[in-house]
């Protein structure tokens, strides 16, 4: 009688701990199923009708995005401010090294797959021109790279919470013949959307300053720590809406799709190539790097991240998923000082899935256009895709804009982005899921590598009665 009771108790405990995770995953499948049923059983839906369907999901997404700026600034500032400069440098070095290695690995894997499978040969594609593509195509690679640096060093931190700097080109139509794009007029403009790079840079500098101020900076440190905790409390309320929000977002996107059969027929091999790359990178390359660093397989941790990954797929935004990722890692027992630094930085600069996707897309279009490319071009694509992925600051379909930069490296027209737009929204969700998973596993890896260093810092700063507690905690962790 005892064993059945124990099993029942364990099952009840498991359900209580994972009910939200299972509900979110179910929400993804229900949203997809409902979307396909409506798509195939009714006529064409208007934009307004689709907007009605996506409305609950839009509210969920807005609530998550509302938390990004205060959580990002307070998390990074409090995490760095709570450590001395040498400890912060060690964590930052480990995190950035991990991000660099995984991003380069993703690009190399993508290039190997696209040159082996060659999905662009013989493809029959219907080009899709939209206003978004027309705007995205009017950029130059030097401008994009300089805008990246300009956004890192913002001139107005308040403005950075709402806008990003962008160099806009416009053609003088009175001149004939038409001038090349390099000779067009240009102006500085502010594009709607938080300047995440600028906020991260400011937060790192502010946190470092507070750490150096020691006792004088304690009041500011306590403020940002409390603000971070308050944002996480709000996150714990918002995540209960995630199953419903994710279901409506996915249903609306599927209804909005053009003919599914026609899309698969024209871009099937391209879609398969990117998906194979994302799968191999997520469950192969990253898993291997994680194992080499921790001597543990990551799949148990990935299972615990199910709700976060389902939300990333539903929203298509690594920045919007950031509050949930931090909350989930906190529940796993990861040191908050690591989580609150590595995750916000990762959500900004670590875009493995985007880097892989852009490398594959550029060479796929080159194959489709029957353009030959040398080894030097492949190296250039690798470097540009890595740089472009850093510029894709965690917003949905930002890769479409940075994709133009990669196409320019191969010598392709910016308008060729239209060739892959039909499946971009779906691949965007898969690559965002890989981005978020990579960030989370990287945080666990950095936490493992920094465990002894953090324990040493705690011992140096601890009161005599706290040393006994730290010793007991260290003993429990060893067991």
Image (cartoon, rainbow, N blue to C red):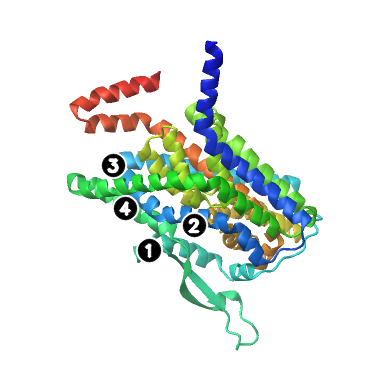
Which residue position holds label 2?
62
User: What's the CA distance linking mark 4 and mark 2?
Assistant: 28 Å
Q: Nearer the viewer, mark 3 or mark 4?
A: 3
Percent coordinates x, y for residue 76 in the rendering: 36, 48
Q: Residues within 10 Å of mark 1 (few under 14, many from 20)?
A: some
The residue under the point 60% across, 89% down is 174
Q: Earlier in the sequence, mark 1 or mark 2?
A: 2
Q: Earlier in the sequence, mark 4 or mark 1?
A: 1
Quick check: 65 above or below 141?
above
Q: Are marks 3 and 4 in contact (CB under 8 Å)?
A: no
Which residue position holds label 4?
205
Which residue position holds label 1?
154
Query: 98 or 157, which is in the foreground?
Result: 157
User: What's the CA distance linking mark 3 and mark 4?
Assistant: 13 Å
Quick check: 187 above or below 314?
below
Q: Nearer the viewer, mark 3 or mark 2?
A: 2
User: What's the CA distance linking mark 1 and mark 2?
Assistant: 25 Å
Q: Earlier in the sequence, mark 3 or mark 4?
A: 3
- Residue 45 seen in the figure: yes
Q: Which mark is residue 82?
A: 3
Q: Earlier in the sequence, mark 4 or mark 2?
A: 2
Q: Residues within 10 Å of mark 4 (few under 14, many from 20)?
A: some
Percent coordinates x, y for residue 75 in the rendering: 36, 47
């Amino acid at each position: 009688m005892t064993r059945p009771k124990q099993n029942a108790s364990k099952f009840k405990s498991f359900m209580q701990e994972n009910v939200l995770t299972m509900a979110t995953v179910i929400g993804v499948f229900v949203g997809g199923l409902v979307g396909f049923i409506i798509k195939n059983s009714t006529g064409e839906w208007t934009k307004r009708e689709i907007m009605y369907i996506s409305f609950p999901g839009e509210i969920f997404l807005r609530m998550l995005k509302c938390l990004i700026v205060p959580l990002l600034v307070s998390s990074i500032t409090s995490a760095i401010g709570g450590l001395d400069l040498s400890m912060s440098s060690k964590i930052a070095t480990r995190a950035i090294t991990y991000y660099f290695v995984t991003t380069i690995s993703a690009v190399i894997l993508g290039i190997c797959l696209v040159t082996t499978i060659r999905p662009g040969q013989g493809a029959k594609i219907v080009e899709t021109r939209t206003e978004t593509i027309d705007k995205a195509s009017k950029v130059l690679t030097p401008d994009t790279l300089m805008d990246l640096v300009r956004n890192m060093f913002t001139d107005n931190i308040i403005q950075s919470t709402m806008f990003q700097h962008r160099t806009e080109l416009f053609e003088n139509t009175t001149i004939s013949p038409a001038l090349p794009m390099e000779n067009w007029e240009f102006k500085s403009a502010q594009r709607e959307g938080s300047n995440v790079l600028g906020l991260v840079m400011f937060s790192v500098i502010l946190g470092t300053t507070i750490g150096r101020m020691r006792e004088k900076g304690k009041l500011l440190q306590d403020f940002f720590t409390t603000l971070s905790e308050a944002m996480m409390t709000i996150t714990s309320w918002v995540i209960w809406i995630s199953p419903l929000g994710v279901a409506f977002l996915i249903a609306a996107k599927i209804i909005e799709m053009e003919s599914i059969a026609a899309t698969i027929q024209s871009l099937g091999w391209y879609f398969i190539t990117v998906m194979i790359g994302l799968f191999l990178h997520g469950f192969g390359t990253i898993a291997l790097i994680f194992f080499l660093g921790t001597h543990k397989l990551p799949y148990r941790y990935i299972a615990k991240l199910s709700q976060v990954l389902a939300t990333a797929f539903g929203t298509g935004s690594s920045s919007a998923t950031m509050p949930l990722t931090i909350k989930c890692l906190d529940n796993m027992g990861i040191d908050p000082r690591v989580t609150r630094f590595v995750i916000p930085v990762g959500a900004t600069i670590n875009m493995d899935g985007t880097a892989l996707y852009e490398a594959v897309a550029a060479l796929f279009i080159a194959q489709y256009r029957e353009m030959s490319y040398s080894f030097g071009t492949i190296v250039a694509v690798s470097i540009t895709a890595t740089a472009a992925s850093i510029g894709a600051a965690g917003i949905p379909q930002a890769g479409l804009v940075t994709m133009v930069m990669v196409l320019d490296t191969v010598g392709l027209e910016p308008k060729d982005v239209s060739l892959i737009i039909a499946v971009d929204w779906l691949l965007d969700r898969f690559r965002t899921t890989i981005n978020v998973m990579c960030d989370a596993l990287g945080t666990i890896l950095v936490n493992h590598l920094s465990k002894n260093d953090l324990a040493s810092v705690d011992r140096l700063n601890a009161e005599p009665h706290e040393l006994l507690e730290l010793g007991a905690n260290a003993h429990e962790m060893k067991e």
